[in-house]
Image: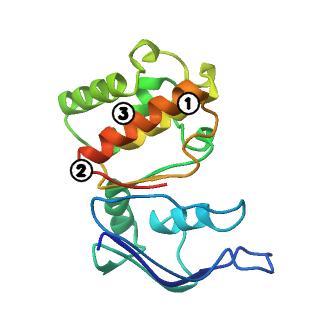
């Protein structure tokens, strides 16, 4: 099993209601899964727990059969394998230009410059961002920022792709393009949970 939640509970500080309570869920390798629920039902919280950004207050999260470890090195390793695309791309973009943003995670890994350039070039082409390579991220539309944030994650070549409200800020054309791209990502072997 790729990702497992076992009796997971999480309550936000100051909230009378738990965001998640007694959640048990298993995501097998190679699947495409969709979480469907009302606003506020805990979908985003589940993604943040899966990526190690939050630690469950009850229960356990397992990655590839092993309980998550919350030390810095373990979390860095996890986040290379579990990519999270936030609902709001503004929360994800960290650099000045599109190219810098997409290369950010790879640079932090200390990869050779030629490998970084190759992977960034592939990501730019795959997500239709080549013409925006030098554009400042603060000049992008929300839909373009959404594509950059997806490219940011996929350039890391994760085993599991988590997408929180993936079509938010996208028009009909870009929503359709995203669904085609997600089909390609899944067909290439990445497990998807959205």
Question: Would you place residue 40 above or below residue 172 in this image?
Answer: below
Tags 3 and 2 in contact by the CB under 8 Å rule? no
Q: Which mark is residue 49?
A: none
Q: Nearer the viewer, residue 179 or 148?
A: 179
Question: Would you place residue 188 above or below residue 121 in this image?
Answer: below
* Residue assigned mark 3: 103
Q: Could you say where residue 87 lies in the image, as x and y percent from the top left? A: 60, 47
Is residue 106 visible to the viewer in this orientation of the structure?
no
Which-is-in-front pick, marks 3 and 2?
2
Is residue 19 visible to the viewer in this orientation of the structure?
yes
At mark 1, the secondary structure is: helix
Q: Could you say where residue 143 lies in the image, as x and y percent from the top left? A: 58, 28
Q: CA distance from mark 1 to mark 3?
A: 15 Å
Q: Pick out the residue farthest to the top.
A: 131
* Residue assigned mark 1: 145
Left or right, residue 42 beside residue 54: right
Left or right, residue 111 beside residue 138: left
Q: Quadrant of residue 193?
A: bottom left
Q: CA distance from mark 2 to mark 1?
A: 25 Å
Q: Could you say where residue 30 lies in the image, as x and y percent from the top left? A: 27, 59
At mark 3, the secondary structure is: helix
Task: Check disc 2: other Cα within 10 Å, few if <14, some if 14-19, many if 20+.
Answer: some
* Residue assigned mark 2: 189
At mark 2, the secondary structure is: loop
2 or 1: tag closer to the N-terminus: 1
3 or 2: tag closer to the N-terminus: 3
Task: Check disc 3: other Cα within 10 Å, few if <14, some if 14-19, many if 20+.
Answer: many
């Amino acid at each position: 099993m790729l990702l497992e939640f076992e009796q997971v509970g999480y309550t936000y500080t100051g909230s009378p209601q738990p965001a998640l309570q007694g959640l048990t869920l298993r995501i097998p390798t190679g699947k495409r899964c969709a979480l469907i629920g009302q606003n506020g039902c805990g979908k985003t919280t589940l993604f943040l727990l899966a990526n190690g950004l939050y630690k469950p207050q009850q229960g356990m999260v397992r990655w590839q059969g092993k309980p998550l470890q919350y030390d810095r090195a373990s979390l860095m390793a996890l986040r290379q394998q579990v990519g999270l695309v936030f609902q709001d791309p503004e929360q994800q973009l960290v650099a000045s230009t599109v190219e810098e943003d997409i290369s950010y995670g790879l640079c932090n890994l200390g990869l050779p410059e030629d490998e970084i350039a190759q992977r960034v070039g592939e990501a730019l082409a795959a997500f239709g961002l080549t013409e925006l390579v030098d554009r400042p991220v603060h000049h992008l539309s929300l839909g373009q920022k959404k594509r950059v944030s997806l490219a940011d994650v996929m350039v890391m070549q994760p085993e599991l792709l988590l997408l929180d409200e993936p079509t938010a800020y996208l028009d009909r054309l870009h929503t359709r393009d995203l669904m085609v791209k997600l089909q390609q990502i899944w067909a290439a072997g990445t497990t998807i949970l959205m």
